[in-house]
Image (cartoon, rainbow, N blue to C red):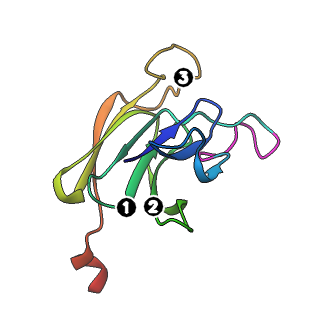
Amino acid sequence: GWFATGHDDGHLSLWKEEKKRPVGNAIVAAHGYHGGASGVTRSVMCCDALGLSDVLATGSNDGYLRLWRVSTEDKGAGIKPLDTVPVHGHINSIAMGPGGKFCVAAVGQEPRLGRWDRVPRAKNRFAIIQLKGDEEKEE
């Protein structure tokens, strides 16, 4: 089986159960940097994948829910950016809906396990994000 991990150092990695190291190239700063390109990388706070598909969603405090395309082919395994959805605040958890029609994100003023880096104008809430389906792309 395959699985993806997000790390507090900003790395996003794809793994195969039989391997000890990530497969393909890890995304180094999946959610960018604090204070510009010379700053500290932002943590990947949460990730969730849509079962039996190639879509992965990650969240952080950069203002975006990021969608990624996962490839599990032998020679081209890896993760590539797919889309971004603006979300104000810390994304502390993500759950993909059935069939990939929507995504629910738990958004807060602060990270789930701390009281630092507060975003005062953000609201503690659930954000329901409608995802684009194949039918919408054809129109």
Q: Which residue is mark 1?
A: 54
The location of residue 110, given as percent across then percent down, is: 48, 22
Residue at position x 59%, y 29% in the image = 8
Where, quadrant-wise, is the C terminus in this rendering?
Answer: bottom left
Residue at position x 17%, y 52% in the image = 98
Front-most of residues 34 and 74: 74
Secondary structure mostly seen in the magenta stretch: loop
Circle 2/circle 1 CB separation < 8 Å: yes
Residue 43 in the figure: left or right of residue 130: right
The three-letter code of the residue at mark 3 reads Arg
- Distance of label 1 from label 3 (alpha carbons): 33 Å
Instruction: Indicate which disc, 2 or 1, sits on the residue closer to the N terminus.
Output: 1
Q: Is residue 120 above or below residue 49?
A: above
Mark 3 vs mark 2, foreground winner is 2
Q: Which residues are magenta?
A: 30-38
Circle 2 residues within 10 Å: few <14, some 14–19, many ≥20:
some
Instruction: Reply yes or no: does residue 61 show up in magenta.
Output: no
